[in-house]
Image: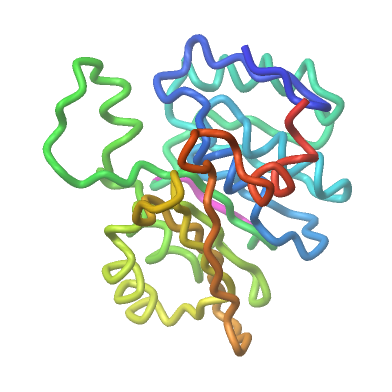
């Protein structure tokens, strides 16, 4: 159970537990007053809840394949102040028909591509890219988004070059990119992305460090997440 400022998250039935990746993405994504948001592969609903807190006019479709994760998400949303603005859908997003485009698609997708090693089949599926993952999101962004909408996601920094290539194939433009360094002095481990069909020059490219060498949290991380952490 995770206590945030305006909501609580229970991920007890969810294979993929709440971690720093989702908190980073939900805090970092730029919200240009979206009214329709898609949380793709929503898990226990943390990104939907974070987005609802930051965007009071947004109505959010949270699409998740796992029944167990949807069970957690339904409970979390029901107990939040945002229950009338978040719609949980237990669906396969790769087969789901979207009647309208979204102002924002946000996702912490499965993104590992190596062989599966997790002893839990559910956890392995939630962490490793199959049909749904980073490539699917980029390939389908133009179908999911309004003309001025954007796609925001997090992925391993080791995939940066591949993602830039996939963006080019999908005719997507970089809006924002942030390299996330877990501990000062180490290399970036994750990259936060926000892309769109529209062009915005120059694109915003930054980096941030989560912890100092002594493992204490940095001021920039605390500032970024201050609206959520108690």
- x 56%, y 25%: residue: 44
Query: Can residue 96 be found in the magenta stretch?
Result: yes
| Residue 66 picture quarter | top left
Instruction: Judge by depth and name the residue closer to the eye, 89 or 26.
Output: 26
Instruction: Count the numbered circles shown.
Output: 0
In the image, which residues are magenta?
95-100
What x and y, as percent, mark residue 60? 71, 43
Left or right: residue 33 versus residue 36 is right
Here the colouring is rainbow
Left or right: residue 100 versus residue 13 is right
- x 46%, y 52%: residue: 154
The residue lying furthest to the bottom in this view is 201
Q: State the quadrant of the C terminus.
A: top right
| Residue 85 picture quarter | top right
Left or right: residue 188 versus residue 42 is left
- x 52%, y 51%: residue: 209
Instruction: Judge by depth and name the residue closer to the eye, 229 or 12.
Output: 229
What x and y, as percent, mark residue 229? 73, 30
Left or right: residue 164 versus residue 213 is left
The residue lying furthest to the front in this view is 214
Q: Main structural element of the magenta stretch: helix, strand or loop?
A: loop
Instruction: Judge by depth and name the residue closer to the eye, 177 or 219.
Output: 219
- x 27%, y 38%: residue: 128
Is 147 rendered above or below residue 194?
A: below
Query: Can residue 55 be found in the magenta stretch?
Result: no
Instruction: Judge by depth and name the residue closer to the eye, 96 or 148.
Output: 148
Q: State the quadrant of the N terminus.
A: top right
What x and y, as percent, mark residue 118? 21, 23
What x and y, as percent, mark residue 145? 59, 66
């Amino acid at each position: 159970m995770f206590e945030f400022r305006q909501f609580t998250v229970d991920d007890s039935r969810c294979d993929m537990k709440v971690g720093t990746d989702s908190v980073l993405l939900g805090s970092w994504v730029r919200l240009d007053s979206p009214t329709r948001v898609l949380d793709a592969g929503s898990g226990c609903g943390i990104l939907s809840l974070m987005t609802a807190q930051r965007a009071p006019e947004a109505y959010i479709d949270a699409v998740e394949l796992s029944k167990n994760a949807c069970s957690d998400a339904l409970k979390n949303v029901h107990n939040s102040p945002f229950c009338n603005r978040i719609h949980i859908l237990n669906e396969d997003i790769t087969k789901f028909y979207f009647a309208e485009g979204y102002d924002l698609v946000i996702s912490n997708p499965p993104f590992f591509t190596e062989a599966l090693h997790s002893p839990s089949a559910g956890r392995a599926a939630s962490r490793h890219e199959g049909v749904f993952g980073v490539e699917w999101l980029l390939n389908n962004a133009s179908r999911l988004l309004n003309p001025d909408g954007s796609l925001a996601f997090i992925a391993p920094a080791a995939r940066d070059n591949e993602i830039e290539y996939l963006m080019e194939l999908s005719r997507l433009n970089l809006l924002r990119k942030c390299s996330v360094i877990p501990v000062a002095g180490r290399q970036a481990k994750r990259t936060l992305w926000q892309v769109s069909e529209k062009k915005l020059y120059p694109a915003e490219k930054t980096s941030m460090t989560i912890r100092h060498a002594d493992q204490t949290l940095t001021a920039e991380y605390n500032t970024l997440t201050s609206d959520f952490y108690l």
